[in-house]
Amino acid sequence: MDIFAFPPLAALLDAAYRGLIALSSLVEPLAGPSAAAVAVVLVTLLVRALLIPVGISQAKAEQTRARLAPRLRDLQRRHKKNPERLQKELMELYRSENTSPFAGMLPVLAQAPVVGLLYTLFLRPEIAGHPNDLLAHDLFGAPLGTSLVSALFGGTATPATFAVFGVLLAVMIAVAEVTRRVFRPTPVEGDDSPLNAPGVLRAMSALHYLTAVFAAFVPLAAALYLTVTVVWTLVQRVILRRRFPLPQAAVVRA
């Protein structure tokens, strides 16, 4: 079933297509053959700029959760054998602090439709019944509608495809490594919850690299969006962490 055959979604996809085509035409005198790629970057920057207030809220929520961590551990110890009472007490604590355990997830959820639209725009040969001209665009010779995995298994990979995807993946992996080192969760002394186990913390750190893995399976345009996004996110997190520092906690020395 094609969900974009549903009229409202078809209209949304067509509007996104026309907007990206118009922006590509606008920057074409400066960007040349890479106009569509530049348009994707500009759209990414616009989306991230619009989400700055959400990022600030996310940083505040992270600071609040860190401040509440000792009280959360105390509740977990006191009501360890009574899950219902523990859940009730946790909800009361979050409510009294005007926060929730899911605070800060909005940036990820808000970007999902944008990534989905870009994925669809550079995957379909037709948009709303007319040819998809975006598929004719490339970035330094690598087609924007081709993914690294499909090019490899389809036998269409070119040196340009390897070079462009190689640069993007290298940037994402480098950003993931910096993020892992700078924002690495540390075991907290006295917290015997499963989430504080060293193995779980290592697994959480490894999640930073999933974006690079995902980028290999999506069209180049979506991979470009993801690359700009992870770089922006790292810079924004560093700035906001300085503005909203986490309270110092007792940690287990390695």
Image (spheres, helix red, strand yellow):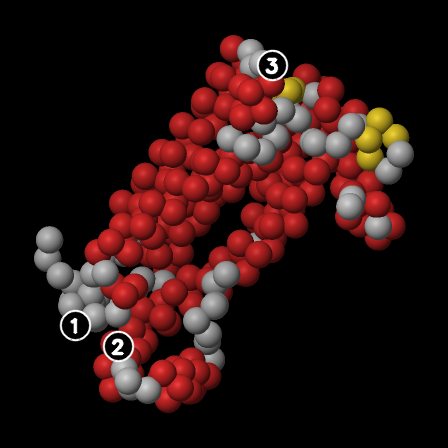
Asked whether residue 15 is in view, the answer is no
| Residue drawn 42% across the image and 31% down it | 171
Q: In which quarter of the view is residue 225 placed?
A: top right
| Residue drawn 70% across the image and 38% down it | 120
Relative depth, front residue between 162 and 51: 162
| Residue drawn 36% across the image and 50% down it | 238
Q: In which quarter of the view is residue 167 placed?
A: top left
Q: Position of residue 210 (x, y in %)?
A: 43, 42
Per the image, label 2 sits on a secondary structure element best described as helix
- Ranked by sequence position, the earlier of labels 1 and 3 is 3
Question: Measured along the vertical axis of the image, is residue 192 above or below residue 204?
Answer: below
Label 3 close to label 2 by CB (< 8 Å): no
| Residue drawn 25% across the image and 86% down it | 78
Q: Position of residue 239 (x, y in %)?
A: 39, 52
Circle 3 or circle 2, nearest the eye: 3
Per the image, label 1 sits on a secondary structure element best described as loop
Q: Which mark is residue 156?
A: 3
Question: Measured along the vertical axis of the image, is residue 26 above or below residue 193?
Answer: above
Residue under pointer 2:
73
Using residue 5 as the reference point, say whether residue 60 is left or right of it: left
Using residue 181 as the reference point, say whether residue 44 is left or right of it: right
Q: In which quarter of the view is residue 150 placed?
A: top right
Q: Position of residue 131 (x, y in %)?
A: 84, 27
Label 1 close to label 2 by CB (< 8 Å): yes
**Number of other residues with Cα within 10 Å of mark 3, as a class: few under 14, some 14 to 19, many 20 or more:** few
Residue under pointer 1:
190
Residue type, mark 1 in image: Gly
Q: In the displayed orientation, state which residue is furthest to the left.
A: 253
Asked whether residue 123 is in view, the answer is yes
**Number of other residues with Cα within 10 Å of mark 1, as a class: few under 14, some 14 to 19, many 20 or more:** some
Relative depth, front residue between 226 and 79: 79
